Amino acid sequence: MYSKNLILEKLQRAVLDGLVVFAAALVATWLRHGVGLLAPAGEGGGVPWEAYLFPAALVAAVFVILLRYQGLYSGQFPRITEAFRIAKAASIGTMAVLTLTFFYRGYSYSRATVAIFYPLCVVSLIASRNMYRAYSRAVMGTRSAARRVFIVGFGQVGRHLAHALLENPAYYELVGFLDDDPVKVGGGLEGVRVLGTTRDLERIVLEHDVDEVLIAIPSASQDRIMEILGECLRLRVRWKVVPNLCDLMLERVHLDHVGGLPLIGLRGSNVVGFNWALKRAFDLAVATVALIALSPVFLLLVLAIKLTSRGPVLYRQTRVGLRGAPFTFLKFRSMRSGSGADIHQSYTADWIYGKSGGASAGRSVGAAVAEPVTKVVHKITRDPRVTWVGRLLRRTSLDELPQLWNVFRGDMSIVGPRPPIPYEVERYTEWHKRRLEVLPGITGLWQVSGRNSLSFDEMVRLDLAYVETWTLEQDIRIVLKTFPAVLFGKAY
């Protein structure tokens, strides 16, 4: 994931630079031909956009290549050094453009446009890169986007790993080291200290809110490594290991590399770093458009609920969200006001323990349990608490629409695992809780794959597959499949 995020960050910067250069070329064209800046006295006329659009795009591509050769996508430079390198790349590019305009006879391009373009381009590139730094810091400061990590091992391998993370954080925030050599405790690297020995693992994880442990002691015995991994599993933090050769034979692991060092770990959530930012942008766009477009439907449903039963229009309930954080979940009220939760609690316990739908299966202890042969319906088929309008809302899933506001607030996502109720989470085994590694969703892979015909363990397996393999394309496919699933009754 680290290496993937690093590549995506470089791509982001390249695309941003290209857009800035393209925009600078068009603004320079407008200033020269539209405003008349540096134009001879008496010269007028409109802006010849059609003659400058393609050259502007070509210049943008050439500048990105020149910036690449100045090392501006492969390393982190001080701002002064970066500004000099930008000016150097822009100087070479501008001289090349002037040379081409001198020999090109197809159109008489204005040299004044190039003269305006050069300082405008340099200033814009420097400003945009500073803005991107501020954006990166804001994203890194978002708790759900960046991973706080520390390194076990302050030897040569650990320091090499730390150098790579400090030079290119890529959504990894290094908070410290652990090392079993007491002489090294208190030392550090570039302001990051050795916080203690491996005996302090639990304390450091809790005090510094650590998400992931990088174990960089490949020369340690296998028993010692396994002790540390066992402690990580007990503390429920992710881990990755700089492996020895035999470790590479492990199955169901994710292989990453930092600074040329291989790291292996259990496959985890793919909704981190750039993917988190992309998913959040998608959620905000869809939620905003849907809230505006469906406002008349909201009004009709409010009237229908208010005129047919007593009580509030919205049903508010505490649900469990990202990493176990509680939030207020919204739905249109479909039950009579004052209805208790005893029926649902009993049903939930039976479903989680494999006793719903007329079936009885032993509770699974892991994700590798075989699927049952027969498919049954796992749901409350006749709930006496539901009003007649509520049954219609539930059948069409219209009661879920207020959750668009949860998405807008950041409590939920458009697509993701359904948010559980606290008393459901109390019955989870450890592997069930992995479905809480992403924001819960309005719809999800479970809803379009059988929903109430699936057992609880099958639902969790689908959620984990979604968490581990997330892509934006997958979210779009699930959203598109949700409509026919609801319209043709396949969601129930």
Image (spheres, rainbow, N blue to C red):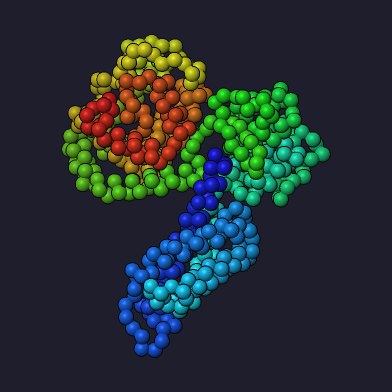
Q: Residue at x 32, y 24 (%)?
A: 450
Q: Position of residue 141 (x, y in %)?
A: 54, 49
Question: How many numbered circles are shown?
Answer: 0
Q: Residue at x 44, y 11 (%)?
A: 362
Residue 257 picture quarter? top right
Q: Is residue 486 left or right of residue 436?
A: left
Please, which residue is most extreme toward the bottom here?
41
Q: Residue at x 69, y 29 (%)?
A: 244
Res. 217 visible in picture: yes
| Residue 293 to residue 58: above or below | above
491, 123: nearer the viewer: 123
Q: Position of residue 132 (x, y in %)?
A: 52, 57
Q: Position of residue 190 (x, y in %)?
A: 71, 50
| Residue 331 to residue 430: above or below | below
For the N terminus, the quadrant is top right
Q: Is residue 221 left or right of residue 335?
A: right
Q: Residue at x 38, y 37 (%)?
A: 474
Please, which residue is most extreme toward the right here?
183
Q: Position of residue 262 (x, y in %)?
A: 64, 36
For the C terminus, the quadrant is top left
| Residue 161 to residue 434: above or below | below
| Residue 238 to residue 165: above or below | above
432, 274: nearer the viewer: 274
Res. 319 visible in picture: no
Q: Is residue 185 left or right of residue 134?
A: right
